Image: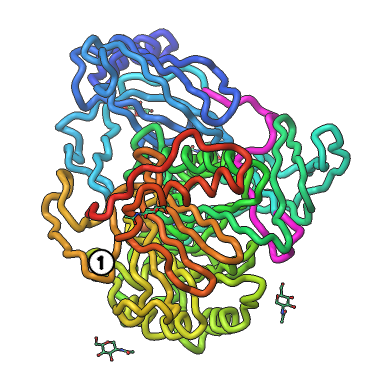
């Protein structure tokens, strides 16, 4: 048996002689507690000797996570004065319902993995063999602050709104509401649900790297009319759906994603911050007009890393707590190797869902909003004739009351028409064209909008790749996957993607651009207008107007008329909104490829 003193000395010598531990390095942070998601923590390190460009800071939550189960990392060299061995950074962190810890590592060439280990997007996955320091204590968020990640959705009943949010525990929980902030005199209990690790179908979603406790998802239905909601602290308000309204406002885009303040196991989408910023501006300018969001697939791109979903819902909350946020299912919400729908002819499925459970509810649905009938379809699950989805869509399109809703807008993730290099989707596209184009044409669908290709591209009214005549009332197809995800083969090469070929723009493609952004839809009984807003300046850069008679008022050639675009833009804010936009329209580019 070793006597206590001997043991102490032995232990001490072991520590100071270990090459992996540099006792002089420290990492501290302040404050010790964050008030709410998105608050900044300042992380400071000192005493890093002979700093290298591969020294990095790991962000851990919960604090007992193993070294390689970080949720994200930042290279110390991203800090200005990193060469001095001391520097500090500010990181906005979200509530993951458990505390945070920070560790500093040196990623050395002699690591087992070398410097070659990369994630699926070719970003480095830094090694954790040589820890230099870890933070003392644990960074928490104030407890008892109430609901987070609030988001709204329409239901099947026109006078209902679904209110959803996350809480840390599963205790009984109420929503207070009323028609006036001073008369919040109704309270309702919430439904609570959650999912478990075993519910995930594959790695990384069911693995210790990707899995984190999801908290408790709560929802409340049947909240009617104009209400104010009260959680434990903040009060929120929304506009209920206007029954029999003769106007429609919506914001549509696909493929937006999430911005994380650190690198994680795949690339995240910084551009999504601008998309949300301009959309919030538009919603605020709408005043008390009802409006809703359509995010047509590839939603948060969490890809099996659960904290990315928390970040996504925190990021959309300013918008989604004010207006209903509706979605289509995209490949990143579905695909995994054992997915149930995987026909032989389709070779385009991979691991895009990151092992998250494929959604099985609300894969296809429709609702009326004002003068427009909106249809949501799933390009990821069985859409062939004979299946439930096909039957639903066919019946739905055939029974639209065009007196009530003169316009029909169909939305789905993978496009029926695109001029980009999505060659792997050709078999799916040809089947969509074969089975759905006849339905769209026969039932005079006004607009068909798609995502997946991360670009904006507007086509002429189409049938079988050919532009129709004005009186044919053919559907206008528009690709609106420019919500924020950066990766896309381009029509023209750009510095980061020099090897891709140039795709010529055929006649049927009237306008296409590589700008990020979103589209605004505004419709009256007479006319539907869809406007593309670019994130780089928040201004309109393309628009199409379609009369209830299906006549296309403006095509790309004509929308180069600046004053016309301004009128379209201003009609959104002046004639129909409460506040006046601070700036007018910008010239429309007709040849931006
Ligand atoms: C961390 O702690 C929690 C709760 O104490 C425990 O359930 C979990 O297994 C621990 N994780 C690791 C990696 O030790
Ligand atoms: C992380 O690695 C260091 C050595 O680099 C080790 O001392 C420490 O115990 C590890 N931490 C965890 C939680 O595994
Ligand atoms: C994750 O799912 C895969 C596929 O179902 C399974 O083989 C694996 O054991 C699961 N891993 C964990 C940690 O549950
Ligand atoms: C169609 O909508 C109009 C206007 O809302 C309504 O008057 C009419 O009854 C509806 N028709 C049917 C068949 O529901
Ligand atoms: C579509 O057009 C091609 C030629 O452009 C023709 O061969 C084909 O039969 C057409 N398909 C339909 C369904 O009309
Ligand atoms: C542009 O629009 C204005 C207002 O609608 C119209 O008066 C003018 O003729 C148009 N110019 C062209 C070149 O189409
Ligand atoms: Fe996508």
Instruction: Choose top left, top right, bottom left or bottom right for residue 85.
Output: top left
| Residue 558 in the image, given as x and y percentages of width and height | 33, 59
Ligand 5 neighbours mark 1 (CB distance < 8 Å)? no
Q: Which residue is drawn at 53% across and 79% down?
A: 389
Magenta-drawn stretch contains 150: yes
The crowd level at tag 1 (other Cα within 10 Å; few <14, some 14-19, many 20+) is some
Q: Which of 409 and 314 is in front in this view?
A: 409
| Residue 97 in the image, given as x and y percentages of width and height | 58, 36
Above or below: residue 186 compared with residue 439: above
| Residue 578 in the image, given as x and y percentages of width and height | 63, 40
Q: Which residue is drawn at 43% across and 14% down?
A: 28
Magenta-drawn stretch contains 248: no
Counting labels gives 1
Instruction: Choose top left, top right, bottom left or bottom right for residue 334.
Output: bottom left
Above or below: residue 550 compared with residue 5: below
What quarter of the picture does the N terminus occupy?
A: top left
What quarter of the picture does the C terminus occupy?
A: bottom left
Q: Is mark 1 on a helix, strand or loop?
A: loop
Can residue 215 be seen here? The reply is: no
User: Where are the magenta residues, as a range?
Assistant: 139-161
113 left or right of 187? Answer: left
Which residue carries the number 1 mark?
A: 419
| Residue 58 in the image, given as x and y percentages of width and height | 36, 29
Above or below: residue 431 compared with residue 289: below
Q: Residue at x 29, y 58 (%)?
A: 512
Can residue 278 be seen here? The reply is: yes
Q: Which residue is drawn at 37% across and 68% down?
A: 415
Instruction: Choose top left, top right, bottom left or bottom right for residue 555.
Output: bottom left
Quadrant location, ligand no. 4: bottom right
300 left or right of 73? Answer: right
Q: Nearer the viewer, residue 469 or 458?
A: 469
Above or below: residue 220 compared with residue 35: below
């Amino acid at each position: 048996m070793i006597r206590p003193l001997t043991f102490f000395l032995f232990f001490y010598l072991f520590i100071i002689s270990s090459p992996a531990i540099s006792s002089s390095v420290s990492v501290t942070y302040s404050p010790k507690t964050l008030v709410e998601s998105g608050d900044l923590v300042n992380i400071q390190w000192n005493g890093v000797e002979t700093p290298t460009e591969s020294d990095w800071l790991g962000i851990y939550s919960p604090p007992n996570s193993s070294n390689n189960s970080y949720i994200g990392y930042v290279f110390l060299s991203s800090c200005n004065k990193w060469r001095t061995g001391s520097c500090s950074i500010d990181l906005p962190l979200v509530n993951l319902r458990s505390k945070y810890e920070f560790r500093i590592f040196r990623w050395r060439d002699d690591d087992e993995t070398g410097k070659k280990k990369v994630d699926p997007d070719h970003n480095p996955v830094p090694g954790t063999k040589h820890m230099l320091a870890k933070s003392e204590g644990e960074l928490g968020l104030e407890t008892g602050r109430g609901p987070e990640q609030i988001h709204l959705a329409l239901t099947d009943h026109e006078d209902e709104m679904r209110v959803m949010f996350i809480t840390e525990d599963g205790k009984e929980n109420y929503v207070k509401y009323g028609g006036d902030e001073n008369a919040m005199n109704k309270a309702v209990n919430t439904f609570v649900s959650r999912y478990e690790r075993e519910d995930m179908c594959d790695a990384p979603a069911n693995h210790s790297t990707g899995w984190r406790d999801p908290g408790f998802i709560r929802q409340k239905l049947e909240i009617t009319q104009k209400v104010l909601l009260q959680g434990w602290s903040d009060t929120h308000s929304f506009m209920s759906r206007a029954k029999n309204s003769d106007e429609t406002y919506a914001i549509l885009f696909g493929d937006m994603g999430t911005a994380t303040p650190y690198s994680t196991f795949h690339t995240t989408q910084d551009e999504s911050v601008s998309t949300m910023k301009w959309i919030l501006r538009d919603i605020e300018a709408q005043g008390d007009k009802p409006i809703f969001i359509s995010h047509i697939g590839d939603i948060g791109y969490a890809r099996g890393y659960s904290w990315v979903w928390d970040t996504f819902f925190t990021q959309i909350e300013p918008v989604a707590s004010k207006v209903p946020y509706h979605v289509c299912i995209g490949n990143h919400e579905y695909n995994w190797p054992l997915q149930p729908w995987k026909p032989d002819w389709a070779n385009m499925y991979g691991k895009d869902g990151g092992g998250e459970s494929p959604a099985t509810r609300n894969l296809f649905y429709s609702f009326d909003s004002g003068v427009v009938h909106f249809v949501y379809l799933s390009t990821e699950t069985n859409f062939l004739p004979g299946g439930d989805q096909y039957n639903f869509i066919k019946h739905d399109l055939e029974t639209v009351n065009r007196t009530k809703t003169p316009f029909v807008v169909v939305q789905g993730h993978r496009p029926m028409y695109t001029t980009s290099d999505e060659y792997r989707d050709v078999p799916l596209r040809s089947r969509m064209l074969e089975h759905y184009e006849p339905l769209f044409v026969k039932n005079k669908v006004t607009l068909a909008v798609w995502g997946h290709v991360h670009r904006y591209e507007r086509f002429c009214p189409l049938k079988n790749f050919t532009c129709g005549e004005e009186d044919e009332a053919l559907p206008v197809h528009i690709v609106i996957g420019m919500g924020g995800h950066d990766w896309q083969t381009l029509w023209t090469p750009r510095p980061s993607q020099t090897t891709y070929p140039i795709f010529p723009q055929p006649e049927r493609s009237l306008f296409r651009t590589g700008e990020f952004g979103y589209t605004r839809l505004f419709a009256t009984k007479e006319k539907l207008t869809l406007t593309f807003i670019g994130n780089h300046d928040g201004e309109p850069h393309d628009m199409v107007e379609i009369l209830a008679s299906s006549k296309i008022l403006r095509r790309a050639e004509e929308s180069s008329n600046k004053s016309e675009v301004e009128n379209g833009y201003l009609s959104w804010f002046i004639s129909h909104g409460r506040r006046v936009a601070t700036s007018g329209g910008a010239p429309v580019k007709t040849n931006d490829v």
